[in-house]
Image: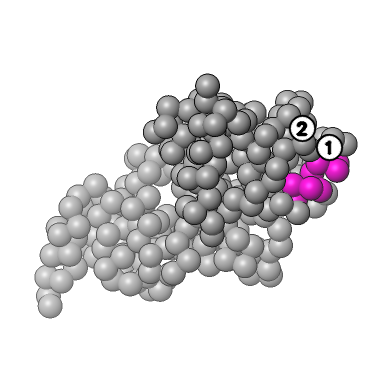
Amino acid sequence: MTGVLVLAGTPIGQVGDAPPRLAAELAGADVIAAEDTRRLRRLVSDLGIELSGRIVSYFEGNEAARTPALVEALQAGERVVLVTDAGMPSVSDPGYRLVAAAVEADIRVTAVPGPSAVLTALAVSGLPVDRFCFEGFLPRKAGERSRRLADLGAEQRTMVFFEAPHRTLAALEAMRDALGADRAAAVCRELTKTHEEVRRGPLADLAAWAADGIRGEVTIVVAGADPAAGVASDPASLRAAVAELEESGMRRKDAIAAVAVQAGIPKRDVYQVVHIDD
């Protein structure tokens, strides 16, 4: 008889938000795979429980090496509970690799639903929630970040991003340049914690606000593109749109890609228009 893999959601801020089943699952687990064992012990202390199972670290740097042993434990009939630093495992946190391996081995996978920064930020953002997509962390390198945002230029669903505090300004500036200065957004900082803050406004205003520095966990929510507000496809409009993005600091190649998405035409058509006099 095989065991069970339990993905356990943990509080993103206040321990009182822990789901009722979390304490029972942790106390009864044969193995607890934790992204940070020190945070796990603090959580266990706050919940007032004692652990009887063994604890193993399971984070980005070792999850590939640790996954086979955890699958073996599951195949031996053990109950393995996976927790990350905050929120649901696998959502921009370790977990996907173990889930995939467990599914491949025909092992049952279940979850203790818990707090989620993605859904919490979306709910308080004031932006449309009927359709949304989660984009995780943007690339750290400026060029890759610009290309990713250019690909999202015509995305009509509300978009949710995670970001490190020291990269939030660069991310907001890149979003402003690729998606438009007037695009509505919200920066959610330290959700559910003592210093929780939700700042709403156009991307240009949010970028200016972030210039003073930001601390804490950050989730950014950005409105989707207005389907009626795309770039006109006539040559003059295309050249003007590319020039505007270049003036904001975007490379021509990335600007062409962004305008092509906004205009709904192939990149080669925009390229030919921009380089017609070259």
Q: Are marks 1 and 2 in contact (CB under 8 Å)?
A: yes
Residue type at mark 1: give it.
Answer: Glu
Q: How many marks?
A: 2
Residue 146 is labelled as none
Is residue 204 visible in the rendered structure shown here?
A: no
Coordinates of residue 147 in the picture (x, y in percent): 35, 61
Coordinates of residue 60 in the picture (x, y in percent): 54, 56
Please, which residue is most extreme toward the bottom here? 278
In the rendered view, does 242 fall on the left or right side of 218?
Answer: left
Q: CA distance from mark 1 to mark 2?
A: 6 Å
Earlier-in-chain disc, 1 versus 2: 2
Q: Is residue 43 magenta?
A: yes
Residues 74 and 197: in front is 74
Q: Which residue is mark 2?
A: 27
Q: Which residues are magenta?
A: 39-47
In the rendered view, does 171 fall on the left or right side of 78?
Answer: left
Q: Which residue is mark 1?
A: 50
Q: Is residue 260 magenta?
A: no
Residue type at mark 2: give it.
Answer: Ala
Q: Where on the picture, by quarter, is residue 239? A: bottom left
**SS class, disc 1:** loop
Q: Residue at x 67, y 41 (%)?
A: 32
Is residue 77 visible in the rendered structure shown here?
A: yes
Q: Is residue 239 above or below residue 226?
A: below
Label 1 neighbour load within 10 Å: few <14, some 14-19, many 20+: few
Residues 202 and 103: in front is 103
